[in-house]
Image (cartoon, helix red, strand yellow):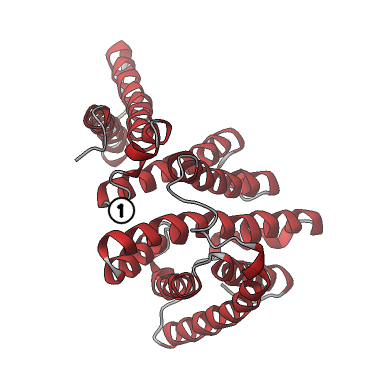
Amino acid sequence: MPPWTGGRIALIVALLGLLGLALGAGWFGAQVTFEITPQGSAGAGLVLIAASLLVGGLLLVIGGLGYYVLAPGFMGREIAARGVGSHGLVIAATLLIVLLANGPALAYAAFAGPRGICSVPGFMTAALSVDLALLGVTYFRFIRPGILTMTDLGLSRSATVRHVGLGLLVGVSVLTVSAAIQATMQALGVRQTQLLDLQCIRDFSPLGFLGVVLAGGVLAPIAEEIYFRGYLFRSYFQARGPLVAYGATSVLFALLHLNLTALLPILALSLIFCFAYQKTGSIVPSVIGHALNNTAAFCILYFTNAQV
């Protein structure tokens, strides 16, 4: 059930938006598939209608999901706490993050061309939009109303040094496990392609590469761990137990990386990060381990000729 009276309406608006997106995308897809070239004013009108459905549908989806997910964060802690561990809120919040995260990158690609995204400004736009979407949704929906606190995230001074040390061990563990899984997959003829689209960072200047590491190797792990372990894993663990918490968190974490061949190693990494959070009660070890994993991958790509 929606956590407040406006939730049902917001979901209906989002569903109408999805319908508009489907109709608009279906029209343009049919044009490409069947090589349809609209002729005359009638054809131009259909194109305009399809484009309007796409844009209007997207705005309705973002608006509906945005209200459904974020509005309770401004209605007091009691309302904000409702449905925190539900599948509905998790899916809606994650979809909202995906839409908000991809909007700036798509806009930049439309402006600079498809290859423009693989430049320092393009990479920073794509990476920072993901980071800001994760942090923004988590803050306004869960941290601001007090559903998720600094104590829940384990960000206390007394334990920080110890947790940093544990994070280094987590980092070594994920690097070892990831390397073992990838070696096994390559032996079975499955080529890892997770970094294939990022090979262009080899052409970046040292300053540009530093920006890549900052956005993808430091800020991204912080944002992802706050959302996936701090909110998603924690809320699922409290509401539905460890099996759902580990499974659902890791599956969503892997799916959002949009790479089928990397699904297994990312699942394994997520399970390790979840375990680290459960045992320590802090996101610091998983943030450190996550940052080491990402930074190592970027450094291998940038400083070596290793094939990815």
> Is 62 displayed left or right of 33 in the figure?
right
> Which residue sits at x=60%, y=74%?
167
Give the class, few, some or many, for how many residues have Cα within 10 Å of label 1's Cα (few <14, many ≥20). many
Q: Residue 290: x and y, percent?
A: 57, 68
Give, as a three-letter code, the residue at label 1. Answer: Gly
Any part of residue 257 in sight: no
Which quarter of the picture shows residue 121? top right
In the displayed structure, 297 sits above or below 148; it is below
In the displayed structure, 289 sits above or below 134; it is below
Q: Mark 1 points at which residue?
A: 85
Q: How many labels does the image show?
A: 1
Any part of residue 209 in sight: yes
Residue projecting furthest to the left: 1
> Which residue sits at x=50%, y=47%?
134
Q: Residue 6: x and y, percent?
A: 26, 27
> Which residue sits at x=56%, y=49%?
131
- Judged from the image, the secondary structure of the residue bearing numbered disc 1 is loop
Which quarter of the picture shows residue 68? top left
> Is 40 displayed left or right of 273 in the figure?
left
Name the residue nearer the viewer: 53 or 256: 256
